[in-house]
Amino acid sequence: MREKVAEILSTLLGREIAPGEECSMESERAWDSMKHIEIILTVEEETGVSFEAEEIPKLTSMARIVARLEDGGRE
Amino acid sequence: MKGMTSHLFAEELKRLELLRQAPDPEAEVVRVAVYRNHAFETVASVLDPFLGFSGLRAECEFGGYDDAFGFQNVFEADLNLMWVDAERYREFDLMEWLGERAAALRARSPAPILLLVAGGAGRRGTWEIPDLWDFAVEALVPPGGGEVYDRGREAVTGTRLSGRACLEVARALGLRLMPAVLRPALKAVVLDLDQTLYEGVLGEDGPEGVRLTAAHAELQRHIRALNEEGFLLCLASRNEEEDVRGLFAGRPDFVLGWDDFAAVRINWNPKAENLAELASELNIGADAMLFVDDNPAEIQNVEISGLGVRTLLARNPADTLRRLRYYPGLLKLRKSSEDAVRAADIRANRERKALVETLAPRDYFARLQIKLAFAVDEEARIARVAELSGKTNQFILGYRRYTETEVRRLMQAPDGCVVTACMSDLLSDSGMIAFVAARAEGERLVCEELVVSCRALGRNLEDVMLSEMMRLAAARLGTRGEALIGYRKGERNGPALGWLRGLTGDPLEAGEGQVSWAVPEKVDLEGLEIEVRQWAKG
């Protein structure tokens, strides 16, 4: 799952992002609020998972997205 | 556009695949001003992959969210987009009010307007505002495959539209609507027969043996509808013509009939050769034709022929139908009465061609009883002038690509005028086939655009018709003596430039410029029946 999310983030943020890398809204200049929506829509589409509206603002790093996808939100 | 395009026409669109597509640095930039009351960003982010298919890319300027559509800041743009969620309003006559708001935008911007309304119960506007087209968002999203709305997500995305709906709207805008507004439409669809319009091989299965599946029938219905919209249909098939005539005569279940095809090439020659002949017979550019064939080798041979014909590989009827539904250039937003007469006119052209080769011009004019009707600043011609300006590629000098609003302004300006010409003869009524757009600069006439429909070419009429149009423009604007004729070299306007070289003796070496020409005081119109109508400035 981490590989899939890294692939999505690489495409959307325009740079190669390794699965083990730290990558978050704070560290990525390209990850603004509009890009965040696009990342969420793409992750949902690619994984078949639908996030609740209230959890979307919290999914602001690769680690948090992967954790949510793998075990429901525990990092 | 080169490379893989399957993801653009896929039954189910994937945002990641679209975003993977590298932007085309050569694409022409379209400035889109977005006026909205809900978020458009999730559509805009995937617009360029679709626009890239037509060699375009968008640069969007976003207005703030504004339910009042007050247009406090109007951006300079090539296209205006009004992006409306109807659910944000109380019950009242929304479409009428939106028409008023669109008229307010029209007063401040000459660029075309696309008005896309979500949640408007499919209602369409009944107003008549030039260069404005409205669509219900729900109609742009194909049925099946998920919900159009995702209300739970609105607080995050700023729009009620689901992720899927945003992708489908981007596809509709990028492949169909924006190219229809900004680019000339295609003119003809050239079809293969075996395994394309039906299942089976005519030469092996016989007329009774080939199968019209439900999907093929639906495909034929769509092609028939394209014909009714004004697109010419042609056949290019490796078969015997007699067999093909027998097929259409013997299969009443076929939706398409032999008479639906304006021209056919049924033989064993290379298809590229047949396509070049069809373009010549129809008097259209090869790049205005879409060739549909199930054989990848035929498609490849046509692609490498250098003709510029667009191609569509018919993999299966459902896929072919979807591609035809989205293919750029197959949506006509500007319709005119000329669309209805085009096919008959093309048939008549074959007879005219035979006569023009054997008779002197005056005898030819008289024999065919050619009538030219000129009109100066006639408002009823505005839509057709914009249409002709938008789609003509061969006999066009300035490439101005006027919108209806620009044509109207030119007609109304004290120093501007538009002269149009309609042609009819014994064989057919060709409708409006040419216009000259001119301005007065002091005492001198400046022709900023001159366009002749390809259907009117080859009748020895260009010289007299255009000279008379220039004379009428000069008389209208009160100019005297030398006129300046503007031109711009394009990829396909060689015929117009050749005519201008012959007329003025100027080699036209610059990429664009103006050449001087003495407007005649009288034009020899012998043999022609002439009518001239002047209209007051509106």
Image: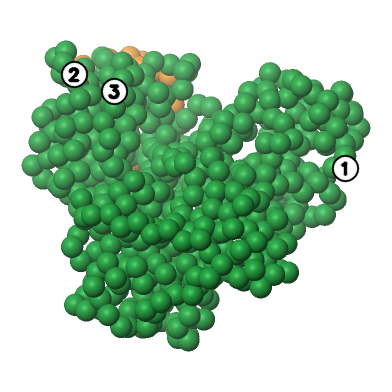
**Closer to viewer: mark 2 or mark 3:** 2
Q: Which residue is rendered at x = 41% and y = 42% of the image?
A: B334
Relative to B163, say whether B55 is above or below: below
Assess whether mark 3 and mark 1 are in contact (beta carbons under 8 angstroms): no
Query: Which residue is denoted by mark 3 in the rendering?
Result: B118
Residue B451 in the image, given as x and y percentages of width and height: 44, 62
Q: Which residue is mark 1?
A: B240
On whether disc 1 and disc 2 are found on a single subunit, the reply is yes
Whole-percent x, y for residue A50 in the image: 35, 17
Circle 2 sits on which residue? B93
Classify mark 2: helix, strand or loop: loop
Corner quadrant of residue B137: top left
Q: CA distance from mark 2 to mark 3?
A: 15 Å
- Residue at 32% across / 36% down in the picture? B133
Residue B78 in sight in this render:
no
Closer-to-camera residue (B441/B367): B367
Q: Of B361 and B51, which appears nearest the observer? A: B361
In the image, taking residue B90 as reference, residue A7 lies left or right, namely right
* Chain coloured orange here: A
Name the subunit of mark 1. Answer: B
Circle 2: residue type:
Asp
The residue lying at 78 percent from left, 27 percent from top is: B199
- The reply to whether dot 1 and dot 2 touch (C-beta < 8 Å) is no
